[in-house]
Image (cartoon, rainbow, N blue to C red):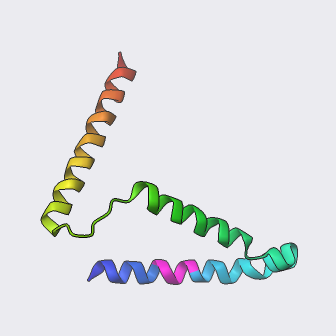
Amino acid sequence: DYEVSASCQVNWACNFIVGLLFPYLQKSLGAYSFAPFAIVLLMTIIFVIIWLPETKGTTPEELRENIVRSLSTMLQLSDESTNDADT
């Protein structure tokens, strides 16, 4: 369960960073000290809505096929752009 351990470590690290930064934000921004966190949250919501696929009703196998197809398309586009830059 490496994934769970890694996500817990990232969560603790982010909480530590927020704990370090918040007093400075509160001192400099006052009542608006939550604004930077709200902006990050809004950007995350936009990312989820625009770029993450809907997985409701799909099997794990279908999801895997979609991810592999998307990654292979991205790699092909990357290879084409690399080849274009070389010529």
Q: Which is more toward the observer, 20 or 34?
A: 34
Residue 42: image location, x then y, percent: 60, 65
Q: Name the residue furthest front.
A: 57
Secondary structure mainly formed by the magenta segment:
helix
6 on left or right of 44: left
Q: Which is more toward the observer, 40 or 79?
A: 40
Q: Residue at x 59, y 69 (%)?
A: 41
Q: Residue at x 45, y 60 (%)?
A: 49
Residue 29: image location, x then y, percent: 84, 73
Q: Residue at x 20, y 52 (%)?
A: 68
36 on left or right of 13: right
Residue 28: image location, x then y, percent: 86, 73
Q: Which is more toward the observer, 51 or 21?
A: 51
Q: Quadrant of residue 72?
A: top left
Which region of the structure is painted magenta? 10-14
Residue 58 position (above or below residue 21)? above
Q: How many marks?
A: 0
Q: Which is more toward the observer, 72 or 1?
A: 72
Q: Residue at x 26, y 41 (%)?
A: 73
